[in-house]
Image: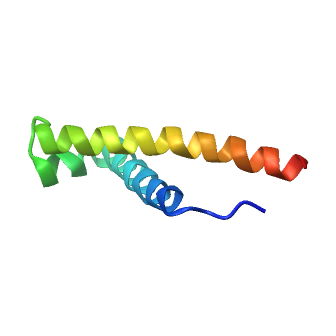
Amino acid sequence: MYKLKLIDKISLVLAIIGAINWGLIGLFNLNLVGVLFGEPANLIGRLVYILIGVSGANLLMLLIKTKQSFKQ
């Protein structure tokens, strides 16, 4: 069984934050990252978006790794 590393746990938290943000945008037209870090997206806001995107890519790799470990 694959044991989650710290980076995987951080990626999960960031992906959840991103998913909640997209849900708020869809339901209430409220961009929580924009509210917290300024609109339009300044440097910090853009970094948050980049980190969320990278965490999504990391979770995709995690999915591939765990799928391979289950086959063995």
Q: Position of residue 29 (x, y in %)?
A: 26, 42
Q: Residue at x 29, y 40 (%)?
A: 49
Q: How is the protein colored in the picture?
A: rainbow
Is residue 29 visible to the viewer in this orientation of the structure?
no
| Residue 5 found in image quarter | bottom right
Q: Is residue 41 visible?
A: yes
Instruction: Give percent across and percent down for residue 7.
Output: 48, 57
Relative to 45, 3 lies left or right? right
Q: Quadrant of the N terminus?
A: bottom right
Nearest the viewer among 44 and 5 is 5
Q: Relative to residue 29, is residue 67 drawn left or right?
A: right
Numbered disc total = 0
Q: Image quadrant of residue 53?
A: top left
Q: Position of residue 69 (x, y in %)?
A: 81, 51
The residue under the point 37% across, 44% down is 52
Q: Residue furthest right?
A: 72
Residue at 85% of width from left, 52% of height from top?
Answer: 70
Quarter residue 22 falls in: top left
Residue at image x 50%, y 62%? 9
